[in-house]
Amino acid sequence: MSASQSFWSPVVAGLKPYVPGEQPKIDRLVKLNTNENPYPASPRVVQAITAAAQQGLQLYPDPESTALREVIARHHGMAADQVFVGNGSDEVLAHAFFAFFQQHKPLLMPDISYSFYQVYCRLYGISAEQVPLDDNMVIRVEDYRRAQTVAGVVIANPNAPTGRALPLADVEQLLQGQPGQVVLVDEAYVDFGGESAIQLIDRYPNLLVVQTLSKSRSLAGLRVGFAAGARHLIDALERVKNSFNSYPLDRLAIAGAIAAYEDVDYFEQTRRAVMQSRESLAAQLTALGFEVLPSATNFLFTRHPRHDAALLAQRLRAQGILVRHFRLPRIEQYLRISIGTPAQCEALVAALRPLLAA
Ligand SMILES: *Cc1c(COP(=O)(O)O)cnc(C)c1O
């Protein structure tokens, strides 16, 4: 232990913090490594934030974010008390782990999924049990039927970094298999082709759905996410939040997020553009010999049978194109490539051609 670490508590010394994708300060990069939206936020969002900045910043924001919760509730056909909002869905997920999964029983999650889940487990002393995806990288719901012996289940649907979506009927099987435990469904990418489980919250008192405005609404920089579920689950999240930070959403975030939901046309237009680019990039990569998993997200998970993934990522980087490579078991030969604008996708394909010919 170094001298500086002697001040750390044992818990902090044992943490394994999440490592986000690179955010380099270099211009003109083709940044396809962190699943951001390639399109800017709606101009109406920028207007709303500007107006909010001109008025009231000396005052605390609404601690309940009532106006935003009402807009989200209306958009999804829920009641406002079935919605909890937080500073990015990462914060919402962290509160959910704290509220529901600290139980001296393991939390089930897929072996290949969003790596932040394991980081929260370490932070809160939750034991994580990884359930292998099948050979096609699909969640096998029958492997999760372990009722009384687990603290709950967390999945991303569509999953990350695989991009694959699980049908709603399978999500229902998970819910029915764990009636006494919370099943948390992280829908960060659902707007790019998944089926949302929000429509099930009235029927399953153990279902908590989490979504974010970071990906499909181009607001990764604003930090807004939410959870939807039965009122008793939302109450638990409120208790945790009010024991931690009363004001996780500032006035600008609340105003911007409301405007994002109000600009339905912009949302539809940009998410369709991303989905179209995804299909055309998938076809081009396939033509170049890549195996591409079917994606219901704004990224592709792909490998080339004759080219090492780490090396490809490194050579793309040398040309100013960033993609994500995970040095992890089962997926070390895969690249996760975020969908860019048509021009960014073209730049990627143009850079890959000579690399693959070499
Ligand atoms: C991006 C992402 C998040 C985090 O989103 P924020 O709202 O920006 O914190 C959560 N879950 C998954 C699976 C993601 O890919």
Image (cartoon, grey):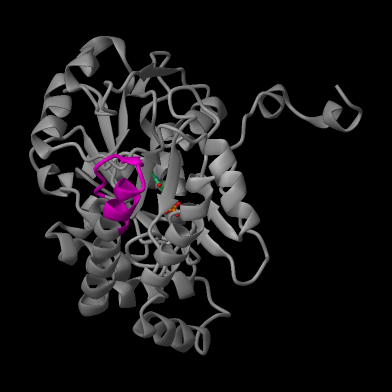
Q: Is residue 223 visible?
A: no
Depicted 262 relative to depicted 217: above or below: below
Give the residue at the far front of this rendering: 357
Q: Quadrant of the N terminus?
A: top right
Quarter of the figure with residue 12: top right
Task: List x then y, in percent, for residue 160.
Answer: 36, 40
Quarter of the figure with residue 260: bottom left
User: Residue at 24% of width from left, 27% of height from top?
Assistant: 139
Q: Is residue 333 left or right of residue 14?
A: left
Q: Nearer the viewer, residue 160 or 344?
A: 344
Q: Is residue 184 left or right of residue 50?
A: left
User: Residue at 31% of width from left, 55% of height from top?
Assistant: 284
Residue 272 shown in magenta: no
User: Residue at 83% of width from left, 29% of height from top?
Assistant: 5
User: Residue at 16% of width from left, 58% of height from top?
Assistant: 79
Q: Quadrant of the C terminus?
A: top right
Depicted 290 relative to depicted 221: above or below: above
Task: List x then y, in percent, for residue 63.
Answer: 43, 62
Task: List x then y, in percent, for residue 291.
Answer: 32, 38
How many numbered marks, from 0 up? 0
Q: Which residues are magenta?
A: 281-296
Q: Nearer the viewer, residue 280 or 325?
A: 280
Q: Is residue 264 visible?
A: yes
Residue 291 shown in magenta: yes
Task: List x then y, in percent, for residue 339.
Answer: 38, 59
Depicted 186 relative to depicted 345: above or below: above
Depicted 136 relative to depicted 132: above or below: below
